[in-house]
Image: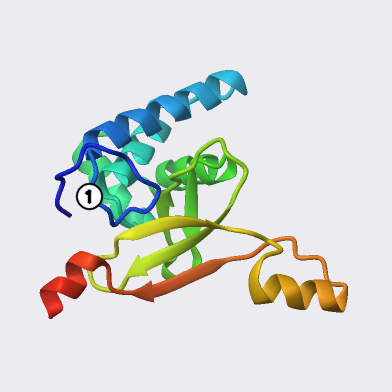
Amino acid sequence: MTQTKSQTTSVGFDPHDHSHCIADALQTAEDICRAQKLQFTPARRRVLEILLERHRAMGAYEILDILAAEGMGSQPPVVYRALDFLTGHGLAHRIERMNAYAACTHPGASHVPAFLICRLCKAVAEVETGLDSGRLGDAARNTGFTIEKVVVEAEGLCPGCAEAAA
């Protein structure tokens, strides 16, 4: 990913100041934890930081390898507890299709995420959608169905991979 602009965007494929978005997201996570009286332990912080640094979906064992190399633990429960905490408090999302995780780009905001996943580089862009919008929302309303959870994951090529493939 090229970093030419110094603006942050909610779609992860756009160029932006990556170090700034990491710092902002970590500060937001600290603020959320402080406000909710949650412990943002060094392991939880580092797992979130790894997800933010990589800007792509990562499996638990891939994260574990990084933590082990840094001397922060080599047991799977270390990562799974951190990921459970992060997903449980809206700081990260589980990408169902890949059995992987990505940092939330809207932490602290109530939203329904949808994910655009590059099948080559595994970059993930999070965009917002709605529980009751579009054709699915229309169908639910027409049948009297109440949607409680939606998981939208689209796989394709990010602009960088599409350009390289052309």
Label 1 environment density (alpha carbons within 10 Å; few <14, some 14–19, many ≥20):
some
In this picture, residue 35 sits left or right of residue 1: right
Disc 1 marks which amino acid?
Answer: Pro
In this picture, residue 116 sits left or right of residue 23: right
* Residue 152 screen position, x and y as percent: 54, 68
Q: Name the quadrant containing residue 125.
A: bottom left
27 vs 38, nearest the viewer: 27
In this picture, residue 48 sits left or right of residue 20: right
Where's the N terminus, which quadrant?
bottom left
102 vs 15, nearest the viewer: 15
113 vs 11, nearest the viewer: 11
Residue under label 1: 15
Q: Give the number of callouts.
A: 1
* Residue 126 screen position, x and y as percent: 43, 55
Q: Name the quadrant containing residue 135.
A: bottom right
Q: Residue at x 50, y 22 (%)?
A: 31
